[in-house]
């Protein structure tokens, strides 16, 4: 049996594949963006709790305690979420941390480029 695929069919399939990859990438970026917004909201809330407990003084001990507590909560939440995902049989192509890291690197590159453009415009 000989299979014949025209260049139009191949091109259409290729475009569809690229379109699916773009949609996946956009979904990952949007999810990472909402994750960042949620993290910043929690950061502000936790900082306010520490401000109430330790007062308005921003001494090094309060900052260290804050960092340790946030790290412990993040580790526990990551382990719990991983267990739930394993029980549900969810398999990622890449670990979530790697996907988020890639999205953040991409966003950082975009911000650096925008900053470069702003500096160039200011210099002119």
Image (spheres, rainbow, N blue to C red):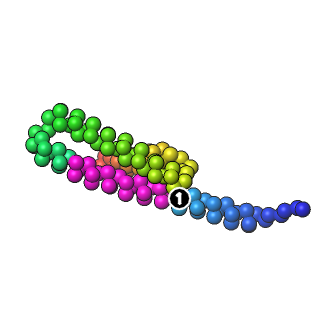
Q: Is residue 83 in view from this perspective?
A: yes
- Packing grade of label 1 (10 A; few <14, some 14-19, many >=20) is few
Q: What residue is rendered at 63% in x and 64% in y?
A: 16
Q: Residue under label 1, please give it.
A: 24
Q: Which residues are magenta?
A: 24-46
SS at mark 1 in the image: helix
Magenta stretch: residue 108 in it? no
Q: What residue is rendered at 79% in x and 65% in y?
A: 6
Res 62 → quadrant: top left
Question: Looking at this view, is 84 or 5 the one in front?
Answer: 84
Q: Is residue 110 in view from this perspective?
A: no
Magenta stretch: residue 44 in it? yes
On screen, residue 50 versus residue 39, left or right, reads left
How would you classify the magenta stretch by its main secondary structure? Answer: helix
Question: Looking at this view, is 44 or 119 the one in front?
Answer: 44
Q: What residue is rendered at 53% in x and 47% in y?
A: 94
Question: Looking at this view, is 2 or 47 the one in front?
Answer: 47
State the residue lying farthest toward the right.
Answer: 1
Residue 38 x/y as whole percent: 32, 55
């Amino acid at each position: 049996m000989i299979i014949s695929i025209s260049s139009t069919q191949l091109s259409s399939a290729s475009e569809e594949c690229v379109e699916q990859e773009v949609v996946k990438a956009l979904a990952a970026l949007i999810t990472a963006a909402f994750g960042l917004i949620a993290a910043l909201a929690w950061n502000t809330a936790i900082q306010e709790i520490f401000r109430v407990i330790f007062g308005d003084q921003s001494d090094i001990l309060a900052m260290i305690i804050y960092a340790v507590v946030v790290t412990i909560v993040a580790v526990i939440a990551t382990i719990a979420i991983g267990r739930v995902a394993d029980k549900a049989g969810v398999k990622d192509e890449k670990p979530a941390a790697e996907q988020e890291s890639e999205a953040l690197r991409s966003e950082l590159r975009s911000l650096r480029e925008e900053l470069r453009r702003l500096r160039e415009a200011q210099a002119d």
